Image: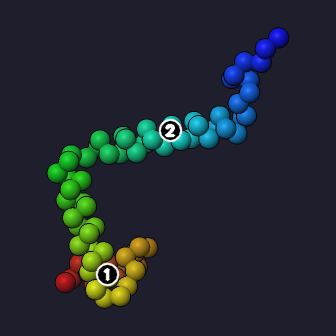
Amino acid sequence: MPISKAASVSPRACAMNLLERDGRAARDYARESLSPATRRAYRTDADTFIAWCRARGVDALPAEPEIVASFLTH
């Protein structure tokens, strides 16, 4: 009796495939929950913060509260 293709997939591989698919769905959902203009604004703001941090020689991520506070006052 031939073994079906489904039977030859390990449970771990099956779980990983499900997690990957669910992860893609979650990213797609999050991406589509914001308008293109909002995503551009977020990207611009993030780029500005990262550049500000680099100019001061500090890490942007993870962002320390004091660094964020200083950025917001500039």
Which amino acid, mark 1? Cys
Coordinates of residue 58 in the picture (x, y in percent): 37, 85
Quick one: 31 or 13, which is closer to the camera? 13
Tell me if label 2 and label 1 are in contact, CB under 8 Å. no
Q: Is residue 22 above or below residue 42?
A: above
Q: Residues within 10 Å of mark 2 (few under 14, many from 20)?
A: few
Coordinates of residue 7 in the picture (x, y in percent): 74, 23
Quick one: 6 or 34, which is closer to the camera? 6
Q: Residue furthest left?
A: 37
**Colouring mode (rainbow / by chain / secondary structure / one colour):** rainbow
Return the residue at label 2: 22
Which amino acid, mark 2? Asp
Q: Is residue 2 left or right of residue 54?
A: right
Coordinates of residue 71 in the picture (x, y in percent): 26, 80
Coordinates of residue 74 in the picture (x, y in percent): 19, 84
The CA span between labels 2 and 1 is 34 Å
Identified at 50% across, 38% down, the residue is 22
Secondary element under disc 2, as helix, strand or loop, is helix
Q: Residue furthest bottom?
A: 56
Q: Is residue 1 left or right of residue 21?
A: right
Could one spot residue 69 in this view of the protein? no
- Which label belongs to residue 61? none
Identified at 29% across, 41% down, the residue is 32
Return the residue at label 1: 53
Report the quarter where the N terminus lies.
Answer: top right
Q: Residue furthest right?
A: 1
